[in-house]
């Protein structure tokens, strides 16, 4: 068993255990393999283990990497998306987890209208209120949900958040729980399914699963330590 295969097996077992504690079906939790900074060979190894959905944070990196990877894979954008990069991002990704403003949602809609496709998106909600985090405030999100039905080339399928980083995964629990509670409230109010909750990363995904995550964004736990890139090329925004 390869290193990635062994680590993936461990991740799946931990997801199953977390689902058992929460009374959930493990089939409702999907693994998003966050491959940012890792090369096509790493992606190919993970794909050979059965993973089919990969996450990237930078449009430029994804544009260079995706053509070198197996063609059957699905790619999601999990990092901060600037509006001037949307035209490049729209053909590359099958889902965006990090839409953090109405203007960005409109821009994604426009790009997808040109392509003749519908983009599933998660709205990123800054539950913690940290000024260093991207995301809509919980107060502003309902307005976006009220208006999103007018944009036929995007589908708001769920919500995403990034809790404050702490060594203790349990400290992320209140933020994951709060987003789930808000999701339930907004789903009833706006008549949207909001079926996806993109929560949790390598160090706290079990807590996220216990609190309702449908996507867990796992990178270093699957691939190992990330290669370091020059400071000038660092990702903008929150990325797992």
Image (cartoon, rainbow, N blue to C red):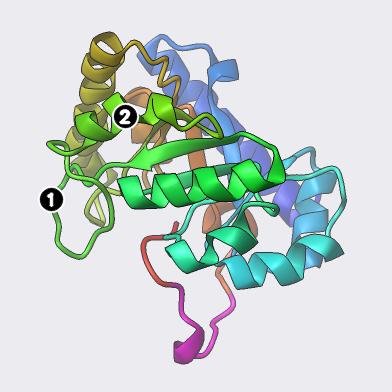
| Magenta region, main secondary structure | loop
Q: Please tell me whether residue 55 belongs to the stretch shown in magenta.
A: no
Q: Residue at x 35, y 51 (%)?
A: 103
* Picture coordinates of residue 26, whole percent (x, y): 55, 18
* Picture coordinates of residue 62, whole percent (x, y): 67, 64
* Picture coordinates of residue 234, whole percent (x, y): 46, 80
| Of the pair 233 and 204, the residue shown nearer to us | 233
Q: Residue at x 23, y 35 (%)?
A: 141
| Of the pair 138 and 18, the residue shown nearer to us | 138
Which mark is first along the chain, 1 or 2? 1
Q: Secondary structure at mark 2?
A: helix
Q: Quadrant of residue 190?
A: top left
Q: Residue at x 31, y 29 (%)?
A: 147
Q: Quadrant of residue 174?
A: top left
| Res. 1 visible in picture | yes
* Mark 2, other Cα within 10 Å: few <14 / some 14–19 / many ≥20: few
* Picture coordinates of residue 230, whole percent (x, y): 51, 90
* Mark 1, other Cα within 10 Å: few <14 / some 14–19 / many ≥20: some
Q: Give the number of the mark in front: 2 or 1.
A: 2
Write down the residue under mark 2.
147
Q: Is residue 114 above or below residue 215?
A: below
Q: In the picture provided, is 198 more to the left or to the right than 179?
A: right
Q: Is residue 92 above or below residue 21?
A: below
Q: Which residues are magenta?
A: 227-235
Q: In the picture provided, is 223 more to the left or to the right than 154?
A: right
Write down the residue under mark 1.
129
Q: Is residue 147 above or below residue 133?
A: above
Q: In the picture provided, is 101 more to the left or to the right than 228?
A: left
Q: Residue at x 75, y 67 (%)?
A: 65
């Amino acid at each position: 068993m390869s290193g990635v295969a062994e680590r993936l097996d461990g991740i799946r077992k931990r997801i199953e255990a977390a689902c058992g504690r929460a009374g959930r079906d493990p089939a409702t939790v999907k693994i998003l393999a966050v491959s940012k900074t890792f090369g096509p060979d790493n992606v190919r190894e993970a794909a050979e283990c059965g993973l089919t959905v990969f996450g990237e944070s930078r449009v430029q990196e994804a544009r260079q990497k995706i053509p070198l990877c197996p063609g059957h894979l699905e790619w999601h954008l999990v990092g901060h998306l600037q509006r001037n990069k949307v035209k490049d991002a729209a053909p590359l990704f099958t889902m965006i987890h990090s839409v953090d403003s109405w203007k960005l949602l409109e821009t994604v809609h426009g790009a997808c209208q040109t392509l003749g496709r519908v983009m599933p998106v998660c709205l990123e909600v800054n539950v913690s209120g940290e000024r260093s985090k991207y995301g809509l405030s919980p107060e502003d999100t309902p307005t976006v949900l009220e208006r999103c039905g007018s944009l036929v080339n995007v589908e708001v399928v769920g919500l995403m958040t990034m809790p404050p980083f702490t060594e203790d995964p349990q400290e992320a629990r209140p933020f994951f729980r709060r987003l789930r509670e808000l999701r339930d409230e907004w789903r009833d109010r706006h008549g949207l399914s909001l079926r996806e909750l993109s929560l949790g990363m390598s160090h706290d995904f079990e807590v996220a699963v216990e609190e309702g995550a449908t996507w867990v964004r796992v990178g270093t736990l699957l691939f190992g330590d990330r290669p370091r890139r020059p400071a000038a090329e660092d990702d903008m925004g929150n990325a797992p």
